[in-house]
Image: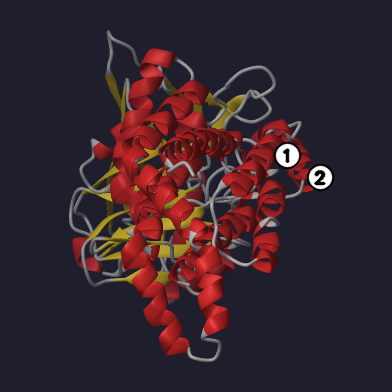
Amino acid sequence: MMEKRTLIAIALSIAVLLIWQFLVLGPQEARRQAAQQERQARLEQEKLQAPAAEPKTEEPPPQAAAAEQARGNAALRPPAAEAVPEETIRVATPLMDVLLSNRGGAVKQITLKGYKADNGTPLVLAMPEPGGEFPLFLHTNVPDINKALNGSTYAVRGGDLALDDRRPEGTLTFTLDQANGLRVEKRLTFHQNRYQIDVGVRVEGGALKGQGYEILWGPGLNAAAANDDEPKHGEPAVFLDGKLSSPQPAGAAWQERQGKALWAGIQSKYFVAAMIPRSPVSAVVVRPAGEKRYSAGFEIDGRDLGVAKEFTLYAGPKELQRLRAYDVKLERVVDFGYFGFLGRPLQRVLAFFYRYSHNYGLAIIIITVLIKLAFYPLTNKSLASMKKMQSLQPRIKELQERYKGDRQKINQEMMGIYRQQGASPISGCLPMALQIPVFIALYNVLLTDISLRHAPFLLWITDLSKKDPYYITPIIMGASMFLQQKMTPTTIDPTQAKMMLMMPVVFTFMFLNFPSGLVIYWLVNNILSIGQQLLVNRKLQESAPTT
């Protein structure tokens, strides 16, 4: 009975896990194609329209200026002398191209050279909506001040940069000086071989009158950096007091002033833009920026006006080695689930085998074989115990008929038979249960590791992070699971056994839209389990006494 309950519990647990993943990660093909076409069309339209759609700073009428003077809030908008055309500055490094605008002194576009969008074009990580805020914008609670901070054209010290071995680092400085005393300086330093921008901000004077301001990344990420199975513009991510969270305010901004915030940013499945404060901040902030879009960053206290605030911006892929180098738990954006303590070393082992095989599909097969070998003795013991329990079923059924209605007597006699034959229900389940955390950890690694993105295997499988386009591997996986179930010893009654045989069918339908890397892992594991069951059955048959 204990074995029956445990087996059913394990099966249901895995089913719940996979059903959840299916609902999150398995959109219909028509929806996927439609979303991809929509993204591509919008990106092309933005490229054509963006230069002409930049908002111009308009001079308010003299009457309005006089009224503001009377209220002590004079000259918030830039004077007519500052109404210069928008200028775009380009920074090229071996890893990325960055376009910056003197409107607001902020980022206009970030293109990652080493990564492609699904349509094969270079991946644009940041591309604001036409007329919207640019990443690294400043925010206050006064709309007029926000227009001055983000709509004004800044003076630029420095020009286009091309970083390489001869010039590994370069700095641009954007400065805004207004007649009312409002002064802003943004200093951006770029590095040759990093997805990093060092940001220095100093704001002082004007009509701020001691109130603070916020520096934010957003809104969101470009839709091309997201997958079909996740929010189109990314989710906020905050690491506060040792915990990773994703606050998603619907109305007013979310703020947290207590505790130590190591970083805040926006993430998609494989990419992240995160700001790391290098000087004290007042609060971590997440602001809604439209439907399912967010900006994230930090608040600077009004008492720090005129004080330069330093940040490190990481805007790039979720490559664990790069993220760990910042030593602020930024690698936690790669979520390996509850068994992350197992997932992280498994990811390193997977990367190790890739270095020698040069194929992540082969690396998945190798690591699956090694895990199976590591658990070989435990699995053998489990299968042998289950086989022995199965052989005792006729005697158990006889007991149940003989002492029908006397549960206590049946249990006593059953335990006597188990002791006499050296069988134990627990010995069959425990070794299998010990393997489940490892399997789930590897499952999550294959689900989240950016290395599998656009990584080919062989023949028709050209992207291990996408589903099998012809559904061949999921169908073979389902067939192998069915065969494995038929071969595995069981003590459940025939009705329950028939219900369990539905599991391969359910799993096959769920795996149809799963990443092919996951399907390969599950298929290889099933094939190895079938081979091990054959060996165990042969060994038990050879050791059985002859009559």
Kindly identify the amino acid type of the residue bearing the numbered disc 1: Gln
* In the image: residue 345, left or right of residue 488: left
Q: Position of residue 270 (x, y in %)?
A: 48, 40
Residue 187 visible in image: no
Q: Position of residue 488 (x, y in %)?
A: 55, 48
Kindly identify the amino acid type of the residue bearing the numbered disc 2: Ala
Query: Where 434 falls versus 157 (above or below)?
Result: below
Q: Residue at x 36, y 26 (%)?
A: 351
Label 1: state its secondary structure.
Answer: helix
Give the alpha-carbon distance from disc 1 to disc 2, as whole Å. Answer: 10 Å
* In the image: residue 384, left or right of residue 134: left
Is disc 1 in contact with disc 2, using a CB cutoff of under 8 Å? no
Query: Where 125 falls versus 234 (above or below)?
Result: above
**Marker disc for residue 276:** none
* In the image: residue 121, left or right of residue 280: right
Give the mark nearest the N terminus, 1 or 2.
Answer: 2
Q: Nearer the viewer, residue 259 or 85?
A: 259
Label 2 crowding class (10 Å Cα cut-off): few <14, some 14-19, many 20+? few
Label 2: state its secondary structure.
Answer: helix
Q: Position of residue 317 (x, y in %)?
A: 43, 35
Find disc 1 in the rendering and name its residue: 36
The type of colouring in the image is secondary structure
Find disc 2 in the rendering and name its residue: 30
Q: Residue at x 38, y 68 (%)?
A: 417
Quick one: which residue is furthest to the front in this view? 547
Label 1 crowding class (10 Å Cα cut-off): few <14, some 14-19, many 20+? some
Residue 521 visible in image: yes
